[in-house]
Amino acid sequence: EVQLLESGGGLVQPGGSLRLSCAASGFPFSNHGMSWVRQAPGKGLEWVSSISGNSAYTYYADSVKGRFTVSRDNSKNTLYLQMNSLTAEDTAVYYCAKIAVIARWYFDVWGRGTLGTVSS
Amino acid sequence: EIVLTQSPGTVSLSPGERATLSCRASQSVIDTQLAWYQQKPGQAPRLLIYGASNRAAGIPDRFSGSGSGTDFTLTISRLEPEDFAVYCCEQYGTSPPTFGQGTTVEIK
């Protein structure tokens, strides 16, 4: 069964950091680009970041550029998102998603998400 | 970036009825690169449609997508109890990919 399982969310103070992980199973992880998509409370989905299968290319939304870093470990079938300098606007459920087709950024597998809350 | 506006915000329907959901883009979506997703509380979002009209694997044929340019539609021909959920569209033809705010299909 194809599955994505996020972890690492929690409560952090403004200015703090969180590191999210996403464990993948059921498909050849290294062959697929992966993304993070978030959803703030009561809001729509927002693309955050993407990474190619071999980590050669990374992409970021303007809202997180310079603060967030996406990475992956293909030997562990795991995707990561390092989030620094967090603000209340970063409070959201963070989803890990598999890019369906190279150069076509729609997402055919999603995790259930992990909640990151930024509050003092 | 391309802004997607979905309407209506909420629609109340009964099982067996037809649902027609709209997604309008602020500029033309390249090559009909538009997807639809279903979201239920506490569950992973589910891909329904890609390329505006192609059903994803395992999606029942009561779900259909249409449209081009700036106007797209998701149609659920006969609502089943499990179809009551939030539906959102995504354009992926122009970077960054963007999503609509969602339409809630609720039981009347």
Image (spheres, coloured by chain):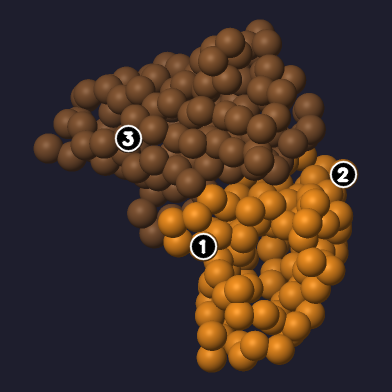
Chain colours: A brown, B orange
Instruction: Pick whichever of labels 2 and 1 is earlier in the sequence.
Output: 2
Mark 1 crowd level (few <14, some 14–19, many ≥20, 10 Å Cα): some
On screen, residue B34 versus residue A73, left or right, reads right
Above or below B12: residue A101: above
Q: Chain of mark 1?
A: B
Q: Amino acid at mark 1?
A: Lys
Q: Which residue is mark 1?
A: B40
On screen, residue B77 versus residue A95, left or right, reads right
On screen, residue B107 versus residue B26, left or right, reads left
Residue beneath the point at 78% across and 28% down:
A103
**Quarter residue A55 falls in:** top right
In what quadrant of the picture does the N terminus of chain B appear?
Answer: top right
Q: Amino acid at mark 3?
A: Gly
Q: Are marks 3 and 1 on the same chain?
A: no
Circle 1 SS class: loop
Q: Which residue is mark 3?
A: A9
Circle 3 SS class: loop
Residue beneath the point at 70% across and 29% down:
A27
CA separation in Å, label 2 and label 1: 29 Å
Circle 2 SS class: helix
> Which dot marks residue B31?
2
Q: Amino acid at mark 2?
A: Asp
Q: Is residue A3 visible?
A: yes
CA separation in Å, label 3 and label 1: 20 Å
Mark 2 crowd level (few <14, some 14–19, many ≥20, 10 Å Cα): few
